[in-house]
Amino acid sequence: LTAGEDGWLRAFDRVVAGGGVSLRGHLNDVNSLAFSPSGRRLVTGGRDGVVIVWDLERGEPLEVFTEPVSLVTTVGFLGPEGSESIFAGTFTGNHFLWHPPADGNPDSPRQLEESLGGSGLLDAAREDRTGDLFLATSNGVERVSAMSSSSTSDFGAPRTSVSAVRLGSGHEIVGVAFTKGRLVCLSRAGRVLAFDTGSSESLLEFDTGYRV
């Protein structure tokens, strides 16, 4: 899957020559994208401040959110597979989450939860084991977890929690990814850091010698 400054997304089939689909929904740069755990949906966020959830099998948008109205730098799916919330973050540190309808009716509107201000968000990686999102910020890595439905019965109550433990604090993290159950991070200064997300233990850190 590729994304560019023209606002187009292009998905290619690596088996069938010329296969694939082009998706058009953003007005300009697509800054971030993430696949759902099932691989059937895609969420994208762009410079136009729009967040789109796509049906990849049909090549059509399922949901369109315009709430951020500012540059979106990272997106993702948060929570258990099949009942994920849609996450979007901005360079100014704003969080936007669209949760599944509280009444369980898929035709009802999603519930918006937002948190304004904080460390600028640059990337996100989903841990499939927990459904948590790990956010690359200008001050380390922030962990966002979905709260159980039993603790969010009140309408308008927060449905996510942010861990007080910030991995790689003091580093401006520009990229995050999971490999073999470990979180690997890249800092603006060119340092690579790896963590065990269960214990928050630092596993390694080294300098690549290149600034990003």
Image (cartoon, rainbow, N blue to C red):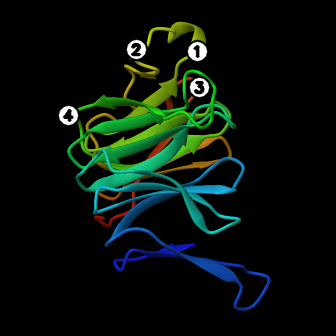
Question: Percent from the top left, x then y, of residue 190?
Answer: 33, 59
| Snapshot quadrant of residue 212 | bottom left
Above/below status of 13 relative to 204 = below
- Work out whether residue 93 or residue 197 is closer to the camera in this orientation and state it: 93
Question: Percent from the top left, x then y, of residue 132?
Answer: 55, 33
Q: Mark 2 or 4 closer to N-term?
A: 4
| Residue farthest to the bottom, as pictured | 17
The disc at residue 157 is 2
Q: Mark 3 or 2 closer to N-term?
A: 2
| Residue farthest to the front, as pictured | 107
Instruction: Say what amino acid the circle numbered 1 marks.
Output: Ser
Q: Are marks 3 and 1 in contact (CB under 8 Å)?
A: no
Q: Element type at marker 4? A: loop
**Location of mark 4 (residue):** 117
| Residue farthest to the right, as pictured | 15
Instruction: Say what amino acid the circle numbered 3 marks.
Output: Gly
Q: Element type at marker 3? A: loop
Instruction: Say what amino acid the circle numbered 2 marks.
Output: Ala
Q: Is residue 115 left or right of residue 11?
A: left
**Location of mark 1 (residue):** 149
**Location of mark 3 (residue):** 198
Question: Percent from the top left, x then y, of residue 74?
Answer: 39, 51
